[in-house]
Image: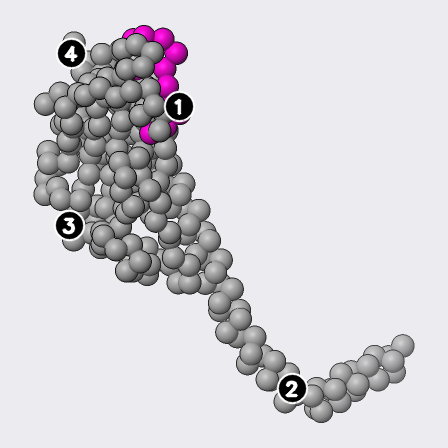
Amino acid sequence: MRGGVFVLLRRILRFYRYNKGGILIEFTFSIPVCISLLFFVNDHFRFYELKNKIKTSTYLAASMIQQIGNTRTDKRLTKKDIARITHASGLNFFHTNTMYDPWPFGIYYLIDCFYVKRINSNNYQYQEVWGSTTSAKTLNDMGSATSVTTKTLAQVEAMCPDLICDKDGDERVLIEGNYRSKVADVSKFDKSKLGFFLLKPKNTKGTDGSTRPLFLYKLVIVPKPGLFPVTD
């Protein structure tokens, strides 16, 4: 038995002696492959992490929209409420002031809300409300809202089919959480700022028509009565 073990060891050593050059060459070629594989795995995890964070931020924003006025007599949301909601929900990823200028991650954060209220079968009240760190210098600069206008059923459906209401007086809000590229030309986005090595985030199109979103999540809610439209 012991003699068989020695014979096996001699054969292994003989094989290594005559093939060590080939083994070293194979090892040399395998190093770049292993490194590339590690980078690829890292990038996939980073994609998953950022998608999960923007989803969580969107749900956080939706929860705060529903609850922020609970202790107030006047439940109606204000632009300052939207600013605070945007800042607080963005801390899920931006733990410091990195959501503001000069945006060291190469992205800014935006919460976009599209409010509709059915007037009749073909007409809806409409307002777009958003909080953004794209040009804000202080927290109070982050909240904005358009005037209330009217949209047709077809226009609302084109925005998002889930915004269609069942009866007159019903309300819906489409909430979009965005990580958007700081540079207008998304092809020039520096992926290394977000920790990517090989893969590069692709831009998507927001409901507002912007092509800057790199990571976007949509959520439709039924708001509590009296929250919308947003006022000053």
The dot on residue 162 is 1
Residue 86 in view (yes/no) = yes
Q: Disc 1 on helix, strand or loop? A: helix
What residue is disc 3 on? 101
Question: Start and end of the magenta stretch?
Answer: 159-171
Q: Nearer the viewer, mark 1 or mark 3?
A: 1
Name, please, the residue furthest toward the right: 1
The tag earlier along the polypeptide, 4 or 2, is 2
What residue would you read off at disc 2?
Answer: 22
Residue linked to disc 4: 74
x and y, in percent, of residue 185 in the image: 25, 55
97 displayed left or right of 232: right
Residue 225: x %, y % from top left = 26, 11
Pointer 4 or 1: first along the chain: 4
Amino acid carrying mark 1 in the image = Asp
Separation (CA) of disc 4 from disc 1: 28 Å
Quarter placement of the C terminus: top left
Cα–Cα gap, marks 4 and 2: 79 Å
- Location of the N terminus by quadrant is bottom right
Closer to the observer: label 2 or label 3? 3
